[in-house]
Amino acid sequence: MSPSMTAAAGAQHTEAEIDSAYKKITWRLIPFLAFLWLLAWIDRVNVGYVKLTMLDELKWSESVYGLGAGIFFIGYFFFEIPSNLMLQKIGAKKTLMRITLGWGATCIAMAFAKTPEVFYALRFLMGAFEAGFLPGVIVYLTYWYPSGRRAKVFSLITAASALSSVVGGPLAGNILNLMGGLSGLSSWQWVFLIEGTPTVLAGIFTFFYLTDHPKDANWLTAREKQLVAVELERDHKALGQREHSIFAALKDVRLWLFVLIYFCIVAANATLNFYGPTLVKDLGFTNPATIGWIMSGAFLLGAGAQILNGTHSDRQCEVRWHCAGAVLLGVIGMLLVAFAQGRSPALVLTGLVVAVIGTSSAFPVFWQMPNRLLTGAAAAVGIALINSIANLAGFGSPFMLSAIKAATGNLTPGLFVIAAVEMLAVLLIIWFVPKNTAAKVKTA
């Protein structure tokens, strides 16, 4: 065998070893992180299903619900950056444990929210606790994966937000149908109790299961740790100079461009999560379980789309069009829902599914753009800043939609506004995000 053939065989063997190491890392970390994100979304958006009975029982208005659903994101705004800075100091597993325990306990406490004031306070507190989870996971993945492998694994995690409706919708619907009056509690109270308890247990388990860095992983061999370290160093060099300074990053106009883009995407996603069940109910579906199953079908397709889009993005080493195209599909679906309101239930459902597929599949690809701009402390703060400010759209869109529905009796004008906001994200990505956000990094 010639020296060149021997070198080629050695390179192939090394690539196989790298793939094997990352397969082990992925199976160890990603299912668990996805499970935590699944619980987070079930606990975050279950108010959309609880609303079907809670408002009538407590004599609350649409405006009370809209403010309570949205105030979650005010808590997000104030506590996300401190949470990510804390992650840099105490590590990922302690941070994610604290976050998970906090929002799980708050979800349980929601069962006893009998006044609007308590409802608002607990929704704010849930946002404050959950703040930092997603940006923390984004930063955490940079400790383990090179950039060319992140979109796929991140899509596997973010797909859990779509799967949350697959699980949470039917679960909440059946609890609402079957458990009303049990032990003197209303059905909506049981939703919060049953869905918050597993989160608390998962938070305790987090501390014992996660590992902060590859070098600390006793479940990796010394050879696997070495291969991962080499891959991360190679990726760091291939990406070139990135911003480390927090203050310099805050002066970079690109960071604020990503804030605006993500704001537009979140506005659409919050609309689908908090008002999707209401849109289905307005079509004449009155059984909460049926509404839950319809929403679960839409979000199951959204989860699949997230994974496909993230995987294809990694293979093509391209993020700009993968993100813009997904958001554009979300715009088309939202417009279809708006135009078909009061005209065609079939078109409303079709548009809802298309909107969920498009908007959901934008998330894992979007986060690869700021990840290639920032690193270190700048990444921790920058990613948290993008997520915290942009998630204020999660406050604004439910509040705006509730006000419009209270004034007009339907959601159509508000849906047109959300579609226009989402379209702005498409234009910003196409016009201002560079075609090559990073050098191509070879992936196996």
Image (cartoon, rainbow, N blue to C red):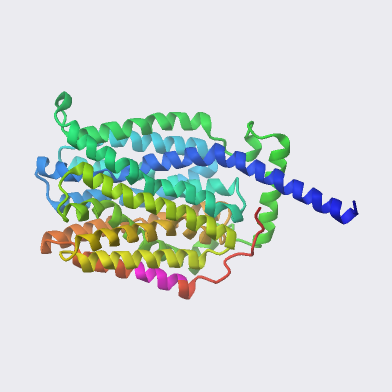
Residue found at the far left of this picture = 59
Position of residue 65 in the picture relative to residue 87 (left or right): left
Up the image or down, 5 lies above or below 54; here it is below
Residue 417 locus on image (x, y percent): 26, 68
Residue found at the far right of this picture = 2
Say whether residue 248 is magenta: no
Q: Which range of residues does the magenta coloring cover?
A: 422-429
Q: What count of labels does the image hold?
A: 0
Residue found at the far top of this picture = 183
Magenta span: helix, strand or loop, mainly?
helix
Residue at 66 percent of width and 50 percent of height: 232
Position of residue 272 in the picture relative to residue 321 (left or right): left
Residue 65 locus on image (x, y percent): 19, 49
Up the image or down, 437 lies above or below 220; here it is below
Occupied quadrant, residue 345: bottom left
Residue found at the far bottom of this picture = 431
Residue 412 locus on image (x, y percent): 19, 65
Please say whether residue 179 is visible from this viewpoint: yes
Front-lying residue, 124 or 326 = 326
Up the image or down, 375 lies above or below 28; here it is below
Front-lying residue, 11 or 65 = 11
